[in-house]
Amino acid sequence: MLNANLRLSSEERQMLLDERFILTKRSILQKTEQLFGQLSEVFRQLVFDRKMTEAAFMQWTPKIARGENYHGLPWVMMDYPRLFTRSDVCAIRCFFWWGRYCSITLQVSGLYQERFQQAIIDFLKKEKDTGWLFSVGDDPWQHVIDDKHYQSGEYLERLLTEQTSRPFLKIAKKIPLEQWDQFDHFFESNFVALLSILAH
């Protein structure tokens, strides 16, 4: 007798028989990777045009990765710049999360946190009404953007009081998946905004 835990629900049975779902999913993820591939060239040109010689930009090319299980859901990401060492991090990450949202984040720690900390705070003050959030969590690799892990600029005083003791700084902005046709503009315009921080 089949264990009850192994029986399929009616919804699972329908999905099992619907090959279109898995083929459509594969197509969406491929298009997301292609979008990030196109954006990677745009981003590199933006950096080149601004003559940014920071090691994080010059030593590493954009990296695109894909997986199936971030909190159980498929994802695609692109990192550029992407300088990661044991003590120092400087990275901008574009992130697609199936069923949730897309986001762009700037993460710094170590020497880069010291260098860009004030520029990030000034940026958040200026852009506090434009959807930018700052991380209040303890895990720099946490990509869940919710009230538990992020706060808006109106709570910036918390960041100002904790900045010296935090091991990293991370700011993020997200866009609903329903706005797929605006993804390219979202990522490009906000990448430019983050470059304004790293240009300091």
Image (cartoon, rainbow, N blue to C red):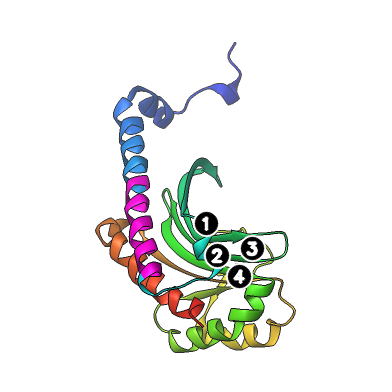
Q: Which of marks 4 and 2 is nearer the N terminus?
A: 2
In the rendered structure, which amino acid carries the disc numbered 4?
Val
* Real-space Cα separation, disc 3 to disc 4, in angstroms: 9 Å
Where is residue 68 drawn, in percent x and y?
50, 39
Q: Is residue 150 left or right of residue 45?
A: right
In the rendered structure, which amino acid carries the disc numbered 2?
Ala
Q: Which of marks 3 and 2 is nearer the N terminus?
A: 2
Q: Earlier in the sequence, mark 3 or mark 4?
A: 4
Q: Is residue 85 magenta?
A: no
- Whether residues under marks 3 and 4 lie with C-beta atoms below 8 angstroms apart, the answer is no
Residue 140's disc is 3
Q: Which of marks 3 and 1 is nearer the N terminus?
A: 1
* Real-space Cα separation, disc 3 to disc 2, in angstroms: 18 Å
Disc 1 element: loop
Viewer-nearest of labels 3 and 1? Answer: 1
* Real-space Cα separation, disc 1 to disc 4, in angstroms: 16 Å
Kindly identify which residue carries mark 1.
60
Q: Give the position of the N terminus as an image quadrant.
A: top right
Magenta span main SS: helix
Kindly identify which residue carries mark 4.
108
- Whether residues under marks 2 and 1 lie with C-beta atoms below 8 angstroms apart, the answer is yes
Q: Which of 35 and 88 is in front in this view?
A: 88
